[in-house]
Amino acid sequence: MIKQSVIENVLEAALSTGGDFSEVFIEDKFANELTLQSGKIEQSISGRDFGIGIRIFSGLQSIYTYTNDFSEEGLLAAAKRAALAIKGGTTGTIQPLKKEIITPIHNIIILPNSVEHARKATIMRQANDIARNYDERISQVKVRYLDEEQHVLIANSEGKFVEDTRIHSRLALQATASEGKEMQTGFYGPGAHAGFEFIENLNLEHYAGEAARIAVTMLHADECPSGKFPVIIDNEFGGVIFHEACGHGLEATAVAKNNSVFANRIGEKVAPDIVTYIDDGTLPNEWGSLNIDDEGEKTRKNILIENGILKGYMIDKFNARRMNAEPTGSSRRQSYRFNPTSRMTNTYIAPGTSTPEEIIAATEYGIYAKYMGGGQVNPSTGDYNFAVMEAYIVKDGKIDRPVRGATLIGNGAKTLQLVDRVSNNLAHGAGMCGSISGSLPVNVGQPMIRVSEMTVGGTKGE
Amino acid sequence: MNIAEYQEKLLDKAIEAGFKEAEVYFERKNSFKCMLYEGQIDSYETSEDGGLSLRGLHNGKMGYAYTEKLDDVSMSFLIDSVKANADVLDENEGIDIFEGSNEYTPYEFYNEELETIGIPEKIELLRLIEQKVRAYDSRIVTLDYCFLQEYSTERSLANSKNLSLSHKENGLVIFLSTVVKEGEELKTGGYLKMTRDFHALNADEIARAAAEEALANLGEKSIPSGKYPIILRSDATASLLSTFMPILSAENAQKDQSLLKGKVGQKVASDTLTLLNAPFHPDALSGASFDGEGVATKEQAIISNGTLQTLLHNRKTAKKEGCETSGHAHKDSYKGTLSIAPQNLYISPGKRSQEELIASVSEGVLISELSGLHSGTNTVSGDFSVAAKGFHIQDGKIVSPVKQMTIAGNFFEFLNDIEESGSELYFLPAGYGSPSLLVKELSVTVE
């Protein structure tokens, strides 16, 4: 993308004022997004994102600059301008760049850019038809198709020089059901670190059907009661709860400055024995997977909590300095516009031994959260909240009636302690995670679990 | 390559390639951001970036593509992509490139002085603020965010109908999140200050506000869950308003995604609510004199004393309805196609201060912060159920912060339940503004 000699000069210019580490991140990304609404393809966008991020460390100071200027003069000027922020320090040395060849673990079969828009549109129309035909009360269907081909080149003053191509494909389906004055929506958004083959092989009947079914089910759901209940959270995207409740608190971004309830607690029991929590960027073709992270480190399987014991964190190169630890292949950024930091990839709770049927049967009265919406957390306090898209009351060990408007709130560290059942049906769901280094594809996953008590906020009194 | 030259060359090439009409939109941003941690620079960022997009009418349909790499290869990429994107569209509604409005309101969105003040001086101010926050109270543990960001943005729009418009703006934002602890209770409080006038920033005031925002959350108590009269603080209201803005979009109404469809001229809110679009409001940092299609923007009432005056239109939705565009075409950046959004939208303030509103409540809850708005709200149904921070009000006084809560309701009902607007107007950086509101009741669930 840029000549190696230019990169070397930029790395050197970045260290000219006393920095001890410099890094260049070059990104060239092609993306397509098509939108179908009211039965018509009404938007189609293609774009090329291109830019260069230069990072310098000086002890515990991190300097970042980015630009779209790809001329050598422009890049050197940007590096020198950034370097001006450093005063004093010991200048690091530049190791000769050694090109590292990575063996991709995520097999890509059909490059999205080689596929005509018409073929993409055909699949979108099929999804639209399936959702519309599900029920006559489906009044609107929105289908978004997204693909991107991101080429990255990462080089640093330690001699790292590595390139990678990341392919993402996603179909996001939203159905709206209407009846009288009521309007409700259902959503499903499968995605993968894979090419167009992922879209072609998608079980549209399932995904589009589910989006429609959720919308129709919620149309006449009762208002959710509020109060404290046992909550059963289904598998797959249900894992978003632990993404918020403890995933973010296990990122070095929060841990390094002791801004996390999980800081300085390695080896401590933070959850019941049945909870094992893992972040794994190597799962083949999963939405949150990567060959290398955005610092060029190979991704890996990081066990964060094992049988309830806190084992590790997700650590990036910069926070590793503050923590006196090693990076874990967890450094990510949305694009060259972001200074990378530790983030999740595919995070999940390992399967347990109960069956989903047993868990429901063992619940006298509670809430069954079948599909979760999104959520958020304050990593300093661990207080989280998230929305339930499709929920039911469980009564006498059986799924009773659907309820809507449920929000779950609580504290991550406390909720973790209250997990009392983990089933055997692990599955992963695709989502976007927003934090200081931008919005990133991540998987959240889990088998069905039960939390013995959670605060449920709804519109109906207790 | 020079931008003006590139724009011109690209327009020529587009017409050569068979586009009937074409538009080039360019945007460039300079930004500086500094984050402090315990007096030291933790991160320091500068950037200069931008991109350019091409819209073109090909076979009667409008295609779209953008690039951030301005080279010759990108020119062919843009032209080929615009064609491919136009060809796949089903819509052929005869929307064309705009020839321009007769008049544009001149307004200065850029304060030159802000950029003449050196970076060291800005960092020094932030350092002083951080020190003052830390020294403010012994219960202050740390600041988990302490940053200052300054930006300037330029935009230009040029098309084959000889319209050529440009816009320049800048601004500075300081954000502090303070962590406080008393016993085992750990709380945070966020505070944001934005301005175009660096000299208007007062370190003492900012530090006090940031510290108090966090300290006020200590000593939390539980209250019974149930329905309570609510005072929704100005900043929380502004964020709720921004989340539900899509219900005002004519495009959403036309696609059956807004329950305000067909309600123009009807009562949709309580008499006390007046909602204004204000592209030139002095308290807001955003705004512009032309919209995403180049249409002149204007001051206008969207809801007047509870009656819906207009939905937000761009040229396409207006054409569909046989009305004039209201000038609300929106381009998030060169990366997106046209959507619909206001240029500063705010709820008109009332007479009494927030304190006076509180004094009028015998038993209720003051909400100071909402979170989870991106997931706990449904703009189609209007339902919301979101996490909240706030305080218990008894006999006209704040008695204690309340444990983690959720508030739930329906936005359309909420609009009708507004009883009074407070007198202080607060704007979010994105241009949504509100005073505090006294609302009849909402469901409150307390942990």
Image (cartoon, rainbow, N blue to C red):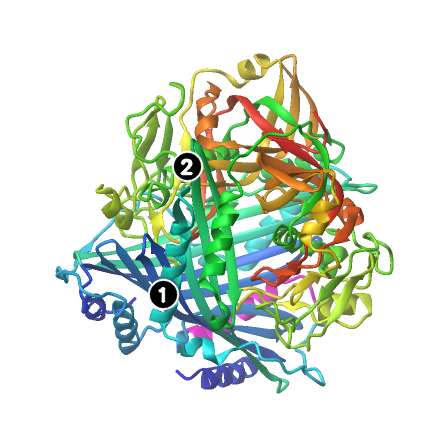
**Residue kind at label 1, given as amino acid type:** Ile
**Residue kind at label 2, given as amino acid type:** Gly
- Pointer 2: what residue? A247
- Pointer 1: what residue? B123
Left or right of B74 in this view: B405: right
Most frequent secondary structure within the magenta stretch = helix
Left or right of A235 in this view: A137: right
Residue A440 seen anywhere in this rendered image of the structure: no
Q: Position of residue B208 (x, y in %)?
A: 48, 54
Q: Check the picture and name the quadrant holding the C terminus of chain A.
A: top right
Question: Which marked residue is nearer to the observer: mark 1 or mark 2?
Answer: 1
Residue extent of the magenta highlight: B74-93
The answer to whether B319 is drawn above or below residue A346 in the figure is: below
Residue A310 seen anywhere in this rendered image of the structure: yes
The disc placed on residue A59 is none
Looking at the picture, tell me which residue is in the foreground, A29 or B180. B180
Disc 1: host chain: B
In the current view of this chain or complex, which residue is farthest to the right?
B266
